Amino acid sequence: MRIKDIINFLKQPKIFVFAIIWMMMLVVLGTLAQKDMGLYTAQNRYFSAWITWFWFVPMPGGRLTLVIILINLSFFFFKKSIWKIKKLGIVILHLGGILLLVGGGLTAMFSSEGNMVIEEGAQSNHVEDYHFMELAIINTSAVNFDEFTIFDQPLLKRNQVLAHANLNFEIEILNYLENCEPTKRTSPAGIQYKGMLKNFILNELKPEKEDNWNRPGMIYKISNSGTNADGMYGIFLGQSISQTVSVNDKDYTIILRRKRTYLPFSIELLDFKKILHPGTDIPKSYSSDINLIENGVVRKILIQMNEPLRHKGYTFFQSSFIEGPNSETTVLAVVKNYGRLFPYISSIIMCIGLLFHLSQKLPDLFRKSKEKIAV
């Protein structure tokens, strides 16, 4: 097949029509599926997937469908007939649509979201991811600093062996539990069990519909340390007492936690305020007085509902709060969206294209109307 034939095929308008119809069907199916599988799972299966399986039949997922639309719109510019002044509005309109799809692709591929939890009087410089976990092994032996060794979510799976030059031992993951619950043992544990597993077991639970409601856990084995630290251990998200081991006069703390992204600045919570609906305990609005600390410079800022803080590509929204006995804690939703400006830019470009196209068509419409009236 010649290159010209390929171009003629890819620029056909019917490809765009079929892709849009299929995308509409995916939106309907994904929306209905949220009731049973939850928002995050439905999004991954229908909208963020390249291929979506219906029983044993593979079909284009949301990402592949949008790529097909992007290719079709791009090959529209290979038509010689469109490069005329009277069709300039259509060209601009297509360009705006392409920019919108490119922005959506950047958002889907590279953007991240999580939250920052800060108690009054405290400060934080990291964001915790909503969905991904990490295993942190912290060498606390030094007096002036801690040495962190981090293993990301893709490595946390059954039968995976974790090793690093910073560690004097190996960790073999015997089982990774997407959702679990610690239960006290009813009989004495074997000698191979260490730490929490001496008194508790981790019961695997059915995953919740909403991914961030799960409590992941892990059963692992420490080996090749040459000490009595070798054995089987258990750990889970939110464990109140962290697991510690000593190997060759070095102390390690092992924590399963949500993936952290460290920021080049810190946020200190000065005061959290909430306003209740009269006569109820339901919050009407809430806000956070913060200090933004960067390179030793302190700047006071107010974050409140519908008025987020934007700094260094991150957007901090006032999301929620936690009430404590002595102080309150703010929960800030944090988003880094690389394609944030694309919807605004593409919308402006498409509006210009539509106005330009209408300005060229209106004289013809008025002329035809006058001809009909004259007849």
Image (cartoon, rainbow, N blue to C red):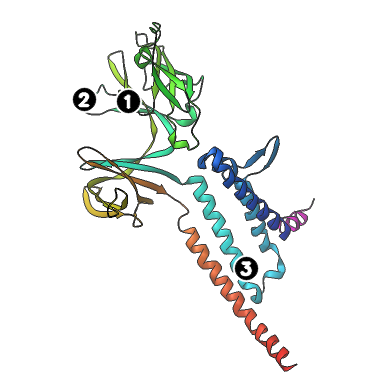
Determine contact: label 2, label 3, CB under 8 Å. Answer: no
For disc 1, the marked residue is: 138
N-terminal of the pair, mark 1 or mark 2, is 1
**Can see residue 12?**
no
Residue 179, label in figure = none
Residue 90 drawn at (x, y percent): 63, 69
Residue receiving disc 3: 91
How far, Cα to Cα, is label 1 from label 2? 13 Å
Residue pointed to by mark 2: 143
Task: Inspect the image, locate mark 1, and give the three-letter code of the amino acid beneath it.
Answer: Ile
Question: Do the residues under discs 1 and 3 have CB atoms within 8 angstroms?
Answer: no
Q: Which residues are magenta?
A: 1-12
Whichever of labels 2 and 3 marks the residue nearer the N terminus, that label is 3
* Residue that appears at 57% across and 47% down: 31
Taking the spot 67% from the left edge, 51% from the top edge, the residue there is: 22
Q: Looking at the image, which residue sits at the far bottom?
A: 374
Q: Is residue 5 found inside the magenta-colored segment of the image?
A: yes
Quarter of the view holding residue 302 = bottom left
Magenta stretch: dominant SS? helix
Instruction: Give the answer, above or below, for where 326 lies relative to 351.
Output: above
Direction from residue 86 to residue 168 in the image, left or right: left
Residue at horizontal 21 percent and vertical 28 percent from the top: 144
